[in-house]
Amino acid sequence: MKRVAILISGSGSNMVSLVESMVGDYPARPALVLSNVPGAGGLAKADALGVETAVVDHRDFPKDREAFENALISRIDAVEPDIICLAGFMRILTPVFLSHYAGRMLNIHPSLLPKYKGLNTHARAIEAGDTEAGCSVHEVTAELDGGPILGQARVPIEPGDTPDTLAARILPMEHRLYPLVLARFATGDRTPVELP
């Protein structure tokens, strides 16, 4: 049974879908939910789900990203996780952190990678005239949103869509996709998951 640490910065909706999936014969269990934001909404949700929580506030390490990441690593390693899941963790991670967890870290991104790495993905898809958008789960590497894609889910872009309406249709797909990919990944299977 793999142990999973989930990193969040906000409301933690993807974290909730992951934790709620980790029951029965699912091959992983949540070991920790950690946020870089004290009071992040997801922390209370994780508490309510019975998962250990922690905060490492990046603002405690002004202009010292390495010290912040060393504090992160120390707190994460205390629960001996096998897998790290980024779920709305809004910090760019350095090679120090990435190499420490190389091959063990997943992220969910709100676009059909390799399109629209970074931010404002829904607006960019609409502005480009795309007919579909979606989300991707990928392995985290040193290239921002650039690691191997382990799963994607697609939704049509409707006439009149705004970034908010598109995001609202994609989010439930994120909540379906991430647990499916994590389950495969936890058994050593990197075959991509495709949701229509």
Image (spheres, grey):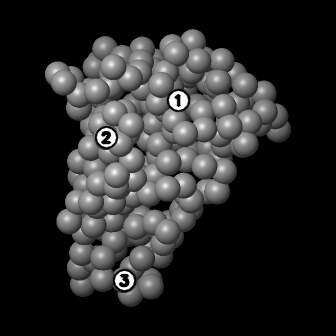
Q: Position of residue 182 (x, y in %)?
A: 34, 39
> Is disc 1 placed on a helix, strand or loop?
strand
Q: CA distance from mark 2 to mark 1?
A: 25 Å
* Residue at x-position 34% and y-position 33%: 187
Q: Earlier in the sequence, mark 2 or mark 3?
A: 3
Q: Position of residue 101 (x, y in %)?
A: 60, 33
Residue 56 lies in quadrant: top right
Image: 150 above or below 22? below
Amino acid type of the residue tagged 2 in the rendering = Arg
Quarter that holds the N terminus? top left
Residue at the disc numbered 1: 35
Q: Would residue 40 be seen by someone viewing this image from the given angle?
A: no
**69 left or right of 86?**
right
Label 2 crowd (10 A; few <14 / some 14-19 / many >=20): some
Amino acid type of the residue tagged 3 in the rendering = Asp
Residue at the disc numbered 3: 130
